[in-house]
Image: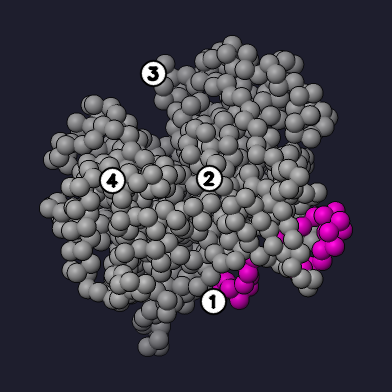
Amino acid sequence: ASMRDAKIKKTKTVCTYCGVGCSFDVWTQGREILKVEPQAEAPANGISTCVKGKFGWDYVNSGERLTKPLIREGDKFRQAEWGEAYDLISSKMKEIQQEHGSNALSFISSSKTTNEESYLMQKLARSVFQTNNVDNCSRYCQTPATQGLFRTVGHGGDSGSITDIQQADLVLIIGSNTDESHPVLATRVKSSHKLHNQKLIVSDLRKHGMADRADVFIQPKSGSDLVWLNAVSKYIIDNDLHDTAFIESNVNGLQDYLHGLEKFTLDYAAEHTHLSKDELIKVAEMIASAETVCSLWAMGVTQHLGGSDTSTAISNLMLITGNYMKPGAGTYPLRGHNNVQGASDFGSMPNKYPGYQDVTDDEVRRKFEEAWGTELSSEIGLNNHQMVDAIHEGSLKSMYLKGEDMGIVDSNINYVHAAFEKLDFFVVQDVFLSKTAEFADVVLPASPSLEKDGTFTNTERRFQRLYQALEPLGDSKPDWQIIMELANTFGADWNYSHPSEIMKEAASLTPLFAGVSYDLLEGYNSLQWPVNKDGSDTPLLFTEGFPFPDGKARLFPVDWTKPIEYDAEYDLHVNNGRLLEHFHEGNMTYKAEGITSKTPSVFLEVSPELAEERGIEDGTKVRLTSPYGSVKVSCIVTDRVKGKEIYLPMNDSGEAAVNQLTSSKADKDTDTPAYKEVSAKMEILKAK
Ligand code: SF4
């Protein structure tokens, strides 16, 4: 081999761009990323990847990477050494704790960082500061889905694996632009649809790629999914199409559930969803007659005032039709970030320790107190959303946030920015100087996934290892190391020399993944929780019943929360979501040349009807204004949207940032922002 070949290094890593959790070898030479090479043995993707996984990596060498800690001086930052940054953080946070108590401090973990790092973040908040004010950004997307599953089936994760979805007779996709948001998973569904006669029902506001190939595509009114789901359930039961044997043996609560369904007649549903009765009956009959059904959903369901209830309604429908406890069936909330599942699994939540153990449970708390050698608080902490309010109210004074561009991705960002400005002390740890970091007092340079070891958990509840391919750039460090060093400045005595030791500790305290160890995760090996002490895992949940005392699932009646409607002034509904090429707010993918060359900026989708009415053409620049802010963006005219529905991708962090428009209104059960309930008015700025 030539000299050049000799220096090439291949490292197994896990993609960080969505919850599918594709794994592959990355080829590097020095700091140069040569290519990504998929391997057949990769459990979630085999030899497939999408454009983000393939080309989205050169951001790690971006000149904009943070390589030194930064300390604010007036309007500017100056570079500092780690010691000085730690000393400052330590003295400021201690001061705030002494003056205002532990609950004046808050901690935010990230679903872009590893399981081990989320574990340490909640351990820092809880054991060093005695507060449960710790959360992660699944609050922005998937917490309602988890809530719906906890209510009904007791585990907050996908029922099976991606291969199970492929086995289903019928796939039901609700409020998920799967094609662009979870591309490799979508490819697998497309192939079973095409080759194995799988049926596909899609419900969405927007006629996206999956809708195009669906056997049945329905376009209900925004925020009305719960209505059609309940009406379909009622129709199925009224017509005796439900699975009575399954319900009898495995499900509680049918009578109360039936009572809750009374008002959801086909007439009621037709009136509120704008679907026809024929469409509703067709959907009901397809679901009832299929042997196996998998339901997939994402933010089109969760980001509403009633997001938890709609997620619950999906699970109820699967229960009455016997679509749990077997391959090819069940519920699949599609996790957005690569580690949305893991960030919550590892306890960065205000009410739960790792493995969803309650902070209010005395026995559980004593276990953690013993292991960590300190007293812990039994008071449920604040979630992200409540933190922002608490800052405005003056009770929350400090925030330590890692890997999360909350100043872009939270809703109503003008309100969030005002909160950041009110903080007495704000520490942001990230790979880039994000919008959020611009408000910080101290910015700590973190290392991205290619520069560290650890594990992620994908949407299938699958633990996978990532191995360090590159040295941390400049003085940046892996998040786990920074959190540990910071904890030690407060007198903790943490001595982890590798993330495997953190995992060992977490597993020893968490029945849900008691048997997880790095030995069992070597290379492309993976484990799906629950993982028993002996290392056996659970690709398919619920095969032996549901994790409730009597082993039975619970039907949970849910009523409809009417969405925020557009009115005479704010007369358009702004839907929002992803583009294939970009990742969320774009702060990584916008710095990846391989991607920006393909999709440089966002555009607003406008229906042909609206375009005609307002005189809009491709390229027309408009201003959208909601009661909370405004954006400027260029239009394209497309029949993917209809009527007064307009669609703004969420990947812009500048003048087209959708969260200038969103409100602080949130899901009533989990405080997940109702991003999808936005109305706005439109002004034409200039023709193209
Ligand atoms: Fe990465 Fe998701 Fe694409 Fe797979 S499908 S390569 S995990 S972004």
Give the label on residue 425, or none: none
Q: Nearer the viewer, residue 252 or 678?
A: 678
User: Quadrant location of the C terminus?
Assistant: bottom right
The residue singled out by tag 3 in the image is: 549
Quadrant of the rendered structure where residue 197 is? top right
The residue singled out by tag 2 in the image is: 664
Spot occupied by residue 220 in the image (x, y as percentages of width and height): 74, 38
Q: Is residue 346 above or below residue 233?
A: below
628 relative position to 423: left or right: right
Query: Which of the two discs, 4 and 3, labels the residue nearer the N terminus?
Result: 4
The residue singled out by tag 4 in the image is: 104
User: Quadrant location of the N terminus?
Assistant: bottom left
Res. 235 in view:
yes
Q: Secondary structure at mark 2?
A: loop
- The answer for how far apart the CA atoms under marks 1 and 3 are is 53 Å
Residue at 68% x, 48% y: name it.
679
Q: Which residues are magenta?
A: 594-620
The residue singled out by tag 1 in the image is: 593
- The answer for how far apart the CA atoms under marks 2 and 3 are is 38 Å
Query: Which of the two discs, 1 and 4, labels the residue nearer the N terminus?
Result: 4
| Circle 1 residues within 10 Å: few <14, some 14–19, many ≥20 | some
Q: Secondary structure at mark 3?
A: loop
